[in-house]
Image (tube, rainbow, N blue to C red):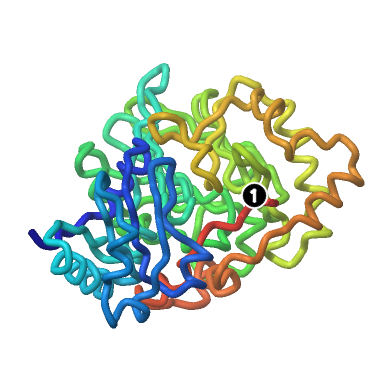
Amino acid sequence: MGIKAMKAGEVAKKVINKQKLFIIDVRNNDAYADWKIEGEGITSINRPYFDLLDGVEELVKELPEDKEVLVVCAKEGSSKFVAEELSEATGKDYYYLEGGMKTWSEHLEPIKLGDLENGGSVYQFVRLGKGCLSYMIVSGDEGAMVDPLRLTDQYEAFAKELGIKVLHMFDTHLHADHISGGRRLAEKTGGTYYLPPKDAGEVTFKYEPLEDGKEVIFGDDQVKVKAVYTPGHTIGSTSLIVNDTYLFTGDILFLDSIGRPDLAGLAEDWVGDLRESLYVRYKNMNQDLLVLPAHFAKLKELDETGRVVARLGDLYKENNGLQVEDEGEFRQMVTENLPPQPNSYKEIRQTNMGKVTPDSEEETEMEIGPNRCAVS
């Protein structure tokens, strides 16, 4: 008997498959209240590490007999200590989260969305610890990324498994809640980084303008990526339509909510653009397009296989953010229901412009916490 490491990927599969797991989170109360591991099969309690230094006898009484028990902390060390104390006290096995919540925040779970009709396929990378979604589109032996995160090693490893080279990187907008990996991937692979020019006024690097109507056709399967200008979350926000099948909406439209227009401090200016994109541009599109957003807020947005995807026409029936026909009421809803700003969003924007270059530890700290790109 003793302690065992549980990897973030193992926890991700348990969350997606709704498997039972009991979690003891030994971070401070405020960290736990802000952000924790959640799921239909997950039960968690918060018992700060410093409260357990005098013994775990009281904690033992709270633990279930019929579930695996995982101890979680910020970076691993405290959870190993508590797991060891529990094992010594009970003679049973306990798990600790390898790498702590830092690793959970950075894990990407790849899930196949489907094959394209004329060849090619699309994969969704679900970042359960942050609510971020990014995508890999495969065409022959070439790949394209949509809204890639800074965690480029995971994309490169997956591309290697598939035997492809990723040469096209698309950001739907200048992100404010996470650091983009688009430019980094392009530099590594010799590929092209596409960014909407209206969001790129202050960037310090070269990029390929992602302008309204631009088409990129790539790979042996001739997969077509078409840009459609849909401002509102940012002034440059641009959606992508792939093979007239998938609609990549970035942070304009989510499955259960809509994008917030205030992360550049211009909510009043951009709310009209947001409404125009949601209530006119998208309504004029093929309603059978499958919506693929850049974020999700709640686990209920994941289907039984862990995918986050919905038919555009269905969202006009089910998404509350698309039901407000009165313009004044819409403006009020959007500007008065904004959640707290994402952690370090100003610094993240500066990083994505190339103005600052934080080290890897600073990048991790900047991104810790839940995603907050939606109107509440």
Q: Amino acid at mark 1?
A: Ser
In the displayed structure, 246 sits above or below 371; it is above
Residue at horizontal 42%, vertical 17%? 117
Image position of 137 with respect to 262: above or below = above
Q: Report the residue at 55% width, 69% height from top.
A: 343
Q: Is residue 342 above or below residue 77?
A: above
Count of numbered tags: 1
Residue placed under numbered mark 1 in the picture: 237
Left or right: residue 67 versus residue 223 is left
Residue at the spot 37% in from the left edge and 55% down from the top edge? 186
Query: On the image, which quarter does residue 73 sit in?
Result: bottom left
Q: Nearer the viewer, residue 57 or 349?
A: 57
Q: Nearer the viewer, residue 177 or 195?
A: 177
- Residue 290, quarter of picture: top right
Q: Is residue 4 visible?
A: yes
Quick one: quadrant of the N terminus? bottom left
Q: Position of residue 199 (x, y in %)?
A: 63, 59
Image side of residue 113 versus residue 279, left or right: left
The image position of residue 252, as x and y in percent, is: 65, 45
Question: Which residue is at the front of the view, 84 or 184?
Answer: 84
Which secondary structure lies at badge 1? loop
Foreground of the two, 34 or 352: 34
Q: Is residue 19 left or right of residue 234?
A: left
